[in-house]
Amino acid sequence: MRRWKRALHTSGRFDFKMLSVSLRSLGGLERTLDVSRRSSLADVQHDICRLFRQRFPATKASLVIDEVTFDEFIDKPFLSCADGTLCTVIFADADDPFFLDKADRLGMKIDLEELVAYDCASEEAARDGSPIEELEAWVLNRRFGKPK
């Protein structure tokens, strides 16, 4: 109860109002996502990519709402949206290293499955006499493919 009163008192309206938007990809798939009005494009990247089974963070989602394109991570596309607004989602290769840099700053979270796979790959490389990659470089190559 206090949170509602504090939000109403500080801004004159509810800052964390949620709304439901419809997302449609260029391929015709449509999904629904509940978001906060104040969410930035960076805040919803992972959710949008997950809904449409896109590779995150290798893929970036841009939104087109009422013929206005939101493609910068700092954009706040939902500020003027009504509940049920239709948003077109455009997927492209990520050109901004924001999420990759964020992972570097926070450190990599390597799963147990990746550790076991790395151990098997390094044992096989040792048997073949090929060079063994560092763990983090190997995991990045496995997750995002070999650099071009």
Image: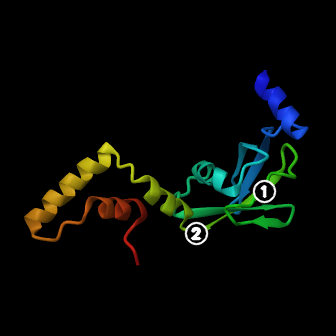
Percent of width and height locating residue 94: 57, 68
Q: Residues within 10 Å of mark 1 (few under 14, many from 20)?
A: many
Q: Which of pointers 1 and 2 lies earlier in the amino acid sequence?
A: 1
Give the farthest residue toward the bottom: 148
Q: CA distance from mark 1 to mark 2?
A: 18 Å
Secondary structure beneath disc 2?
Answer: loop
138 or 54, which is in the foreground? 138
Residue placed furthest toward the top: 1
Measuring from the top left, give residue 63's x and y in whole percent: 74, 61
Residue topped by disc 2? 96
Q: Residue at x 40, y 53 (%)?
A: 107
Q: Amino acid at mark 1?
A: Pro
In the picture, the quarter occupied by the N terminus is top right
Q: Are marks 1 and 2 in contact (CB under 8 Å)?
A: no
Q: Residue at x 59, y 51 (%)?
A: 46
Q: Is residue 112 above or below residue 9?
A: below
Q: Is residue 14 shown above or below 77?
A: above
Quadrant containing the C terminus is bottom left
**Res. 77 mark:** 1
Residue ranking furthest to the front: 10
Q: Nearer the viewer, residue 124 or 79?
A: 79
Q: How many labels were placed on the picture?
A: 2
Left or right of 38 on screen, residue 114? left
Mark 2, other Cα within 10 Å: few <14 / some 14–19 / many ≥20: some
Q: How far across and how far down the image is residue 50, in percent?
A: 57, 49
Q: Amino acid at mark 2?
A: Asp
Query: Which x, y percent locates residue 4?
Result: 81, 28
Question: Disc 1 on helix, strand or loop?
Answer: loop
Q: Residue at x 75, y 43 (%)?
A: 36
